[in-house]
Amino acid sequence: MRNTPPETLTLDRVATPVGEVLLVTDGEEAVRALDFADYEARMLRLLRRHCGADPVLAEGRAPEGVRRAVEAYFSGELRALDGVAVKTGGTTFQKAVWAPLRAGPAGETRSDRQRAAAIGAPKAVRAAGLANGQNPVAVIVPCHRVIGANGTLTGYAGGLERKRWLLKHEGVSA
């Protein structure tokens, strides 16, 4: 078996109103990870899991279109991330849980129970929540839109204050 060299990805840092985000892209201009800088260790762990190996991260600038889309979203263009390509690993179940998150409009919230039912697995509520926590491309796959069954804010890997800000940014009073 031939050893293949680890994939080289670009790590960009983008200032936002709720803190610096780490934006990781590949040579095909797909986003491989996006997370807040104060959660870099988590992002790296998820990136390794989704890449299947330890990628080489080279500090640099993300492709202009991707960077502009991230900046535009945080400036109020809520649909700016819709066309951004992402490339992640994940199980078939995780991808099924993430797909409706990305397809839904900005400001539309759902509980894990609603998300599990929507993918035809109504008893997989806890698994849907766990899949949410394995999402390596926060904000683009908007896991911040997941709320408690009673409509309250629930955990968010970027912190509840950021979740509150993101939802308010999208027009949801949280």
Image: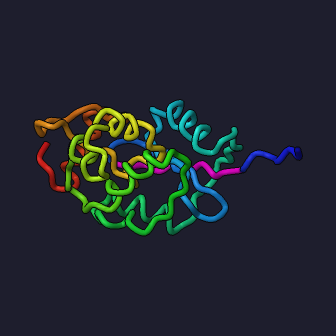
Name the residue: 88% across, 46% down.
Answer: 2
Locate residue 124: give its quadrant.
top left
Which residues fall within the magenta stretch? 8-16
Q: x, y percentage for residue 74? A: 33, 56
Left or right, residue 135 beside residue 9: left
Q: x, y percentage for residue 60? A: 63, 53
Report the predominant secondary structure element of the magenta stretch.
Answer: strand
Name the residue: 50% across, 69% down.
Answer: 65
Q: Is residue 96 magenta?
A: no
Q: Quadrant of the C terminus?
A: top left
Q: x, y percentage for residue 161? A: 25, 35
Locate residue 20: give its quadrant.
top left
Name the residue: 21% across, 48% down.
Answer: 110
Locate residue 149: give its quadrant.
top left
Left or right, residue 22 beside residue 123: right
Left or right, residue 66 beside residue 157: right
Nearer to the camera, 26 or 72: 26
167 in relation to 61, above or below? above
Nearer to the camera, 150 or 10: 150
Indicate the colouring scheme: rainbow
Nearer to the camera, 55 or 127: 127
23 in relation to 73, above or below? above
Q: Quadrant of the N terminus?
A: top right
Q: x, y percentage for residue 101? A: 32, 54
Left or right, residue 143 beside residue 53: left
